[in-house]
Image (cartoon, rainbow, N blue to C red):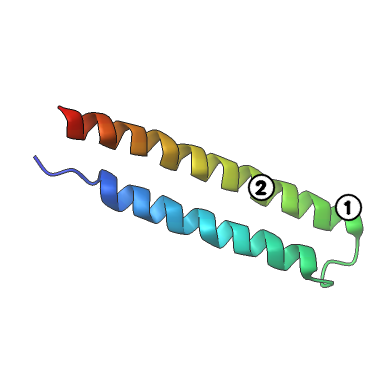
Amino acid sequence: MATILNELIDELDAKAKRIEKEIINLDRSSVIPEHYNKAESILKLTDKGIQTEEQCKYLSKLRNMNEQL
């Protein structure tokens, strides 16, 4: 039976890196006029980044367990 864990982990890792870049670019940007809106946007992206990294870590742990079997 084939596993897609490696592919999924790679996709999550790439997504996390895109979110990191998005946060940095948003922080540097002066497009959002209100400081509060900028902060809220950064915090929402941070939550998505944390969730993505946690999913990646969890699936990596499962992949390692699967390889040991």
Q: Residue at x 78, y 68 (%)?
A: 28
- Which is more N-terminal, label 2 or label 1? 1
Near mark 1 (Cα within 10 A), the count class, few <14, some 14-19 or many ≥20, is few
Horizontal and vertical percent position of residue 31? 82, 72
Which amino acid, mark 2?
Answer: Thr
Horizontal and vertical percent position of residue 8? 33, 49
Q: Residue at x 43, y 38 (%)?
A: 57
Label 1 vs label 2, nearer the camera: 2
Residue 30, picture quadrant: bottom right
Q: Residue at x 30, y 32 (%)?
A: 62
Residue 5, placed above or below residue 15:
above
Instruction: Measure the alpha-carbon separation of dots 1 and 2.
Output: 15 Å
Residue 38, picture quadrant: bottom right
Horizontal and vertical percent position of residue 65? 25, 29
**Residue bearing mark 1:** 36
Near mark 2 (Cα within 10 A), the count class, few <14, some 14-19 or many ≥20, is some
In the image, taking residue 68 as reference, residue 5 lies left or right, namely right
Residue 13, placed above or below residue 66:
below
**Residue bearing mark 2:** 46
